[in-house]
């Protein structure tokens, strides 16, 4: 293995279809019109020296190294800013150019430390490379004049006012101003790629320097630590602290991030089995060379001291854990599940697949439950997040997935974001979205909070509809009312692609006055003119795309809202081409994949119902078993059955339902009622408090397999180090299956994918070999689409004719009143991920050390609450305490928190109300009251005590 070196062409590729021919150094080359001469030369194999240019950024022309000569033209223009032209003759190396470049390099080096041998960038420094490229052998100017290098003058030891000390405040990278050449690449990366505008160049002339904000340190500035500046830096000015500590990497492997549903591709750069850094891969089609703080830097949890690497068992949850061999742990699992089925019946057991594990691992868990235990009692975390997406989109379009690839946003004219906060929850795609908005796309935001998309540097929503939580259906149906009654329907599209009779019935329904923005205002709290304006913009503004998240699905009418969104897209013809569509932004790295892999109790792979005889027969033949034709239990049903005494054992791979699911008291009661809870995870998570067997899991760095992201993109996960627990997660599941007597003999996860492809019509063309060949594949991939499907429903919907559904607004049963006058809604924050089990074990806690409650100034003043006060939040389900942050980001009557820290116990106060079709919990609407308090509640203190009790471990040698 060696380091994967990506070619830097200096400037971005031109998208022009018109070709231009020119001559460079006597060689004719043909490139797209608009291509820079620098890039054209690089494409023919000629490297022009450069420092300020990189193909991730627009051309800038400041370093003056990339100068060229053009026959018949005066001067020496910069090749990065000079486009190709027909018939011109370019010279990239002449005596004049060589002299100019060498002189420029002398100036750079005269104000730069000469510590190359001890510099962290030694061997990976573009300044060093360019000095060699231009033939620099001496610096005529010396090093004793004005400089930014030395703290004191070398002549008289006086203090050097130009010198600045290193900024080490960011936990992941260092900023050394003395090594800065003011190339502007970091500033431009922050602006053009990330879109945060956190960096600037302060001063003028020789006083110029990179500055986070108004001369702040990096940690306290607006920097979001995405790493784009570090990646862009051509010197050691911005350097990863792990590179300083470990040294330069010696080999790299392409893999996929294990955080959110964007699915960023990375180069894991290694020394031996130690990760030096994760660098976003430019050829990654989901992220296009960009990253966020989590994927770029927060991988330290893989080697955290809290990792459990040995199997453990105990008889009662109050007993200490006892470390045992894998053989004993697996025998315990198989034996207990068999005993429980014999004692309580076949249906007394079940399991939960993981959206953090690979497709192959999720597939094997559901196969174990169906073929090994003979039941369909299997579910996944999508139950509590995007199960309404599967139901709603399957109903409307015929497929349970988003319609576009991420590149599609580059052709979007109107972006409608509803119930999603991409800059925080899906930051890399959020940056691409913001870039498109800066280029001129219009923006509609439907959200109770004023998120960063509503108003941030160079971004301002054309319409922000600050609806009351729980009224999504009312808002979207009111928009449909405007589109229909004002004659904005794309009738040609509807007649050709949708069921006309159902459409007419839908038109009659939405046209009713009760669905008008004015009539709905009593529920939504939104100015009717805002809804009318947003609807007109969406219907008439050109290519319009809808992006939505958990703020849509986690409601009692989640499925209804998804179908209402689909109605809007079909009615306006915004389907089946680039720049449009309906795009659910999935929360976890493989939540799409876990759903694809038959993790729901009523479906097999390909979203085919378990009752379908033909489908079931194919699986029975492949698996050599008989399958139950009846759907099994969902997660809430399993917990209910456990409390009733009919469900006694559960196998949970990579999910923490005690922290992530609603009504913590109900979840804990269900787990406590079971006789065998098996948790397979990296850490003793909150659910493991009630476990009897703990099987140590494996990180994404320690195994091979695939993830499927929010755009249906299947990508490779590649092993870069030996599993610290000894096994990949799929191997652990296979050990259980073999102990149960199943004839499983997989030796590589590629064999599991081959089996999936044999059984799944949308995957018949998928294999590890093809994924590696193409870099990634978007399903469906089969004989009809051998290279995958970036855009769905191009000529017709998967179901045939698009189906319009009536979406009547029905207020949630969770109502505010005198006792609980506020509405609590929940969400995520950039630096943390899901329940925080991974990110809390990294330096990301520097930005979000605890969950807080956002409350409007009016509501805070009415309750005597000051910023930073401890407050108690009470609901009908329970109460918890956390600190208050007073902000007008939330409207009066609404409070907001996150759920990343188990000490907060946010789900103690969420209720059992759920989506009518899928049981997805109504996390986004909980009636609460907020009052000042003195600190954590008694329940929180008891919870911490019980956690300590249930996390005691007796090492194997002590147990003997």
Image (tube, rainbow, N blue to C red):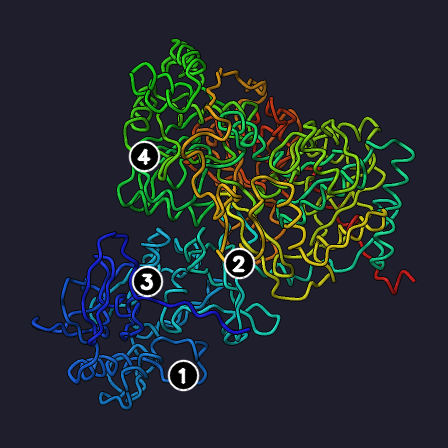
The answer to whether residue 546 of the structure is visible from this angle is yes
**Going from the N terminus, do you reach mark 2 or mark 4 first?**
4
Give the residue drawn at x 63%, y 50%. Answer: 358
- Whichever of callouts 1 and 4 sits on the residue coming sooner in the sequence is 1
Where disc 4 sits, the SS reads loop
How far apart, in angstroms, are the residues tagged by discs 1 and 4? 52 Å
* Earlier sequence position, callout 2 versus callout 1: 1
Above or below — where is 643 with respect to 732? above
- The residue located at (33%, 39%) in the rendering is 412
Vertical side of 827 occupied by 269: above or below: below
Q: Mark 2 points at which residue?
A: 772
Task: Name the foreground residue: 840 vs 296.
Answer: 296
CA gap, disc 3 and disc 1: 26 Å
**Is 161 placed left or right of 73 in the picture?**
right
Label number found at residue 55: 3
Residue at 61% x, 39% y: name it. 595
């Amino acid at each position: 293995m060696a380091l994967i070196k990506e070619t830097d062409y200096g400037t971005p590729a031109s998208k022009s279809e018109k070709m231009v021919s020119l001559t460079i150094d006597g060689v004719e080359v043909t490139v797209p019109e608009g291509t820079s001469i620098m890039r054209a030369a690089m494409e023919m194999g000629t490297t022009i020296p450069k420092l300020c240019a990189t193909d991730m950024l627009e051309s800038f022309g400041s370093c003056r190294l990339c100068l060229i000569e053009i026959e018949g033209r005066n001067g020496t223009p910069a090749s990065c800013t000079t486009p190709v032209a027909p018939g011109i003759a370019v010279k990239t190396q002449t005596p004049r150019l060589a002299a100019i470049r060498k002189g420029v390099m002398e100036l750079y080096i005269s104000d730069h430390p000469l510590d190359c041998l001890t510099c962290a960038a030694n061997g990976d420094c573009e300044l060093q490379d360019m000095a060699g490229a231009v033939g620099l052998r001496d610096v005529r100017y010396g090093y004793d004049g004005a400089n930014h290098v030395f703290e004191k003058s070398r002549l008289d030891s006086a203090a050097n006012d130009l010198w600045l000390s290193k900024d080490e405040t960011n936990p992941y990278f260092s900023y050394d101003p003395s090594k800065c050449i003011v190339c502007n690449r970091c500033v431009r990366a922050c602006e053009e790629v990330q879109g945060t505008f956190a960096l600037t160049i302060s001063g003028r002339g020789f006083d110029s320097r990179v500055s986070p904000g108004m001369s702040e340190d990096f940690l306290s500035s607006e920097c979001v630590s995405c790493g784009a500046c570090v990646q862009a830096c051509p010197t050691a000015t911005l350097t990863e602290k792990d590179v300083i500590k470990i040294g330069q990497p010696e080999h790299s492997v392409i893999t996929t991030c294990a955080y959110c549903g964007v699915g960023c591709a990375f180069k894991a750069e290694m020394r031996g089995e130690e990760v030096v850094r994760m660098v976003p891969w430019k050829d990654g089609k989901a992220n296009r060379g960009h990253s966020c703080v989590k994927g770029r830097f927060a991988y330290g949890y893989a080697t955290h001291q809290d990792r459990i690497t040995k199997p453990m068992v105990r008889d009662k949850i109050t007993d200490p854990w006892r470390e045992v061999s894998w053989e004993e742990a697996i025998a315990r699992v198989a034996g207990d599940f068999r005993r429980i089925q014999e004692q309580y019946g076949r249906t007394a057991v079940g399991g939960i697949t993981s959206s953090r594990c690979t497709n192959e691992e999720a597939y094997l868990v559901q196969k174990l439950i169906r073929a090994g235990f003979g039941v369909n009692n299997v579910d996944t975390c999508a139950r509590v997040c995007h199960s309404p997406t599967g139901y709603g989109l399957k109903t409307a379009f015929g497929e349970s997935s988003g319609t576009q690839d991420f590149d599609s946003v580059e052709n979007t004219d109107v972006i409608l974001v509803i119930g999603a906060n991409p800059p925080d929850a899906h930051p890399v795609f959020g940056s691409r979205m913001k870039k498109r908005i800066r280029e001129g796309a219009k923006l509609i935001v439907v959200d109770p909070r004023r998120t960063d998309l509503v108003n941030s540097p160079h971004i301002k929503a054309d319409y922000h509809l600050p609806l009351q939580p729980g009224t999504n259906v009312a808002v979207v149906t009111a928009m449909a009312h405007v589109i229909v009654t004002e004659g904005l329907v794309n009738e040609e599209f509807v007649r050709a692609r949708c069921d006309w009779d159902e459409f007419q019935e839908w038109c009659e329904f939405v046209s009713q006055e009760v669905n008008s923005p004015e009539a709905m205002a009593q529920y939504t709290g939104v100015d009717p003119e805002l809804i009318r304006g947003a609807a007109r913009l969406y219907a008439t503004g050109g290519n319009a795309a809808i992006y939505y998240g958990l703020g849509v699905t986690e409601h009692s009418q989640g499925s209804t809202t998804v179908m209402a969104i689909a109605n809007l897209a079909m009615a306006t013809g915004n389907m089946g081409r680039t720049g449009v569509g309906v795009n659910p932004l999935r929360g976890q790295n493989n939540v799409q994949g876990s759903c694809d892999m038959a993790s729901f109790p009523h479906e097999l792979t390909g979203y085919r119902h378990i009752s379908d005889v033909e489908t079931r027969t194919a699986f029975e033949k492949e698996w050599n078993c008989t399958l139950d034709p009846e759907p099994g239990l969902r997660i809430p049903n399993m917990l209910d059955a456990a409390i009733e005494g009919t469900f006694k054992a559960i196998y949970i791979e990579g999910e923490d339902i005690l922290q992530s699911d609603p009504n913590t008291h109900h979840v804990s009661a269900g787990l406590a009622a079971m006789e065998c809870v098996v948790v397979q995870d990296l850490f003793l998570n909150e659910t493991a408090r009630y476990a009897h067997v703990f099987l140590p899991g494996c990180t994404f760095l320690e195994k091979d397999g695939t993830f499927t992201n929010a755009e249906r993109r299947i990508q490779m996960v590649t092993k870069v180090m030996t599993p610290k627990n000894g096994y990949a997660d799929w191997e652990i599941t296979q050990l259980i299956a073999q102990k149960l007597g199943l004839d499983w003999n997989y030796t590589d996860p590629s064999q599991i994918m081959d089996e999936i492809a044999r059984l799944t019509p949308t995957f018949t063309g998928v294999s590890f070999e093809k994924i590696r060949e193409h870099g990634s594949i978007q399903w469906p991939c089969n004989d009809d689409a051998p290279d995958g499907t970036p855009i769905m429903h191009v000529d017709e919907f998967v179901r045939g004719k698009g189906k319009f559904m009536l979406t009547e607004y029905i207020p949630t049963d969770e109502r505010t009143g005198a006792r609980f006058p506020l509405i609590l809604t929940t969400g995520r924050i950039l630096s943390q991920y899901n329940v925080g089990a991974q990110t809390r074990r990294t330096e990301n806690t520097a930005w979000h050390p605890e969950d807080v409650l956002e409350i409007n100034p009016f509501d805070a003043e009415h309750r005597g609450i000051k910023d930073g006060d401890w407050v108690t939040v009470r609901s009908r389900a329970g109460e918890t305490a956390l600190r208050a942050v007073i902000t007008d980001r939330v409207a009066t009557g609404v409070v907001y928190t996150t759920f990343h820290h188990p000490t907060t116990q946010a789900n103690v106060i969420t209720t059992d109300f759920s989506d009518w079709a899928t049981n997805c919990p109504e996390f986004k609407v909980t009636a609460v009251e907020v009052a000042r308090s003195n600190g954590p509640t008694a329940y929180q203190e008891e919870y911490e005590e019980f956690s300590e009790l249930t996390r005691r471990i007796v090492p194997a040698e002590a147990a003997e």
